[in-house]
Amino acid sequence: MNRICISFLTLFLFFPLFLSAQDDGLSLLTENPEKPSVFYGFVRGGLYGTMDKNDDKPYVSSAFSDFGLKAEIKDNIRFKAFADIRFRYGTEFLEPVKNINLREAYVKVNGKFWDITAGQTIVKWGRTDFSNPTSKLNPQNYISRSPDPEDMDMGNLLAELKIYPAPFFSLQAVAVPYYRPSTLLIDPLPLPGWIKINQLPALLTSRDMFSYGLKAEFRLSGTDMSLSWFNGYDPMPGAALTAFSLDMSGSFPSPSAEISMTPYKIQNFGIDFENTIGSFGVRGEGSWSVPYKSHKTAEYVPLEEVKYVAGIDWMPGDWRLTAEYSGKTILGFEAPAVEPLIGAELDMAKLSALLADPGFVLDDYVRQQVSSFNRLYNYQMEKTYHSAGLRIERELFYGKVVPSVFALYNFTSRDLLLMPEIRYKPADGLTISAGGDIYSGKKGSVHDLVNDFMNCIRIAVRVDF
C-alpha cells in the first residue's frame, strides 16, 4: 500500500476520534433522545415485452414481482441507521430470477463538525442529470429491468468521513475496500459459439482492490461547486483475452476464444458546479481520467480521456424541462488497427489470407480485436464525441397523470435512446406506469448490438406503503 493510502487511512481512522474528544462532542454523547423506527416500502409487478426479429411476433422477455422494504432508525442528533432490502421473483431476458438484494444497509454517526458512514451504501458524486463523469464510487446495472431509473444504482461496501470546518466548506473522504463491478449493457449480448466470456463475481475481496476518493465542496454565494479525486478501480471493467486457439484440421480455420472481464485502476480528477440564473438551473461537470496501465500493453484498459457536461433545467408552471450536452476528448488518440472482435462479422477468407503471411502473429491480432471491442463500448473509436439529452415532463390533473419523454443522441456514434412514459396515480400510494425503451444505432455500434434484447414496451403497477 503506498504512502497516499496510508495517509488516507490515518486521517480516516483517527480524525473523528480527535473530534469526539472535544467538549461539545462529549456533551452530545451524554444525551439520550428517543429513537423512533420507521418502516416503509413498496410492492411492484410488471413486465417487459418485445418483438422477435425472426418472426416479428411479440413475447414477454422479462416479468417481475418486487417487494422492497426500507427501515430507518435515528435519534435526530447522534446517529441514523438505514436499510433497503429488495426481493425479486420473475424472469430477466428469459432467464429465471429469484434473489434477495441488500441494496443499502449503513450506519451514520454525527458529530458537531463531522459525520461517519459505514456499510453498504450508494455514494454518487456530480451534479448533472444524465451523465456524471466524476462519479466512480458506486457501480451501476445498465440493464436494470425496472421502471425506476434510480434502481440502476448499486450499493458498495465503504466507509465515509465528512468534516465541516466552515459553513461554506466541507471535506469528504471515502474508502472502498473491495471491488464490485457494474453490470454492462452488453452482458446479455448473444455471442458467437466460438467466444466465451467469463464474468466477474459479485464482489472481489482481494486486498489489492482498495479504492478511495477525496472531495472538497464549496457553498459560495449563489454557486455550489466541488473538486474531487478518485484513485482506484473503475466500476466498469474491461474485456481481456485470456485464451485463444485455432483448429486448422477442417476446410476452414475454426477459432476458439475466451475473454475475461477484468478490473483496471485509474485516477479520476473532477470538478462540478451548480447555479441559478433567473428561472433556470445551470449545472456543469468535468473529469480527467488517467488509467495506470496503457491500452497498448493491456487490451482491457481504456485510453486517457477528458469528459465535460453542461446542462440546464426549467420548470415553467406544470412543465419540467431538462437539457444536457456532454462530450469527451480521447487524449493520445490512435485509430483502431482492426475491427472489434464482437460486433463485426468474422471474415474467414480474410483470416485465411492473413494466416498465409509468415510474419502474421495471430494472438496479437485477436488481442487487438479485443482492444477494439473495449474501445467500442467505452466510446473511444473516435477522437472526440458529442451527445445531447432532453427530458420533457408535464403534470396533468393535479399531478395524477404525468407524461414524459427522454431522448439521448450521440452525434458521433449515432446511437439513439428514446424512452417515452406515462404515469397514472389514481389513488394515494398507487402508481400505474407504461412506457418503452428504444435503442437504435448504425451497424456495429453499441446500440445496434443491444437493441434486439433492450428494445421493449414496459408496464408496471406499484403500491407504496
Image (cartoon, helix red, strand yellow):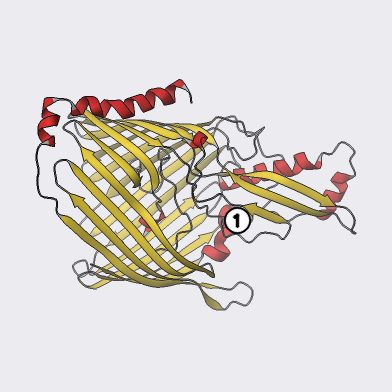
Task: Point out residue 60 in the picture as x, y percentages from the top left corner.
Answer: 50, 75
Left or right: residue 94 versus residue 357 is left
Q: Position of residue 243 (x, y in %)?
A: 73, 46
The residue at 53%/76% (across/down) is: 59
169 up-or-down from 413: above or below: above
Depth check, front residue: 205 or 321: 205
Pinpoint residue 322: horizontal percent, then vertical percent.
33, 51
Between 314 and 273, the one lying in front of the other is 273
Residue that label 1 marks: 442
Q: Secondary structure at mark 1?
A: loop
Structural crowding at the residue carrying mark 1, measured as other residues with C-alpha within 10 Å and reported as few (<14), some (14–19) or many (≥20): few
Image coordinates for residue 460, horizontal then vertical, percent: 37, 71
**Residue 414 visible in the current orientation:** yes
Residue 70, quarter of the rendered image: bottom left
Residue 433 shows in the view: no
Q: Residue at x 77, y 41 (%)?
A: 363
Q: Is residue 453 shown left or right of residue 387?
A: right
Residue 238 is left or right of residue 8, and the answer is: right
- Quadrant of the image for the C terminus? bottom left
Q: Classify 219 as above or below 129.
A: above
Up the image or down, 278 lies above or below 169; here it is below
Three-letter code for the amino acid on which mark 1 is drawn: Lys
Instruction: From the viewer's side, name the closer residue of 77 and 427.
Output: 77
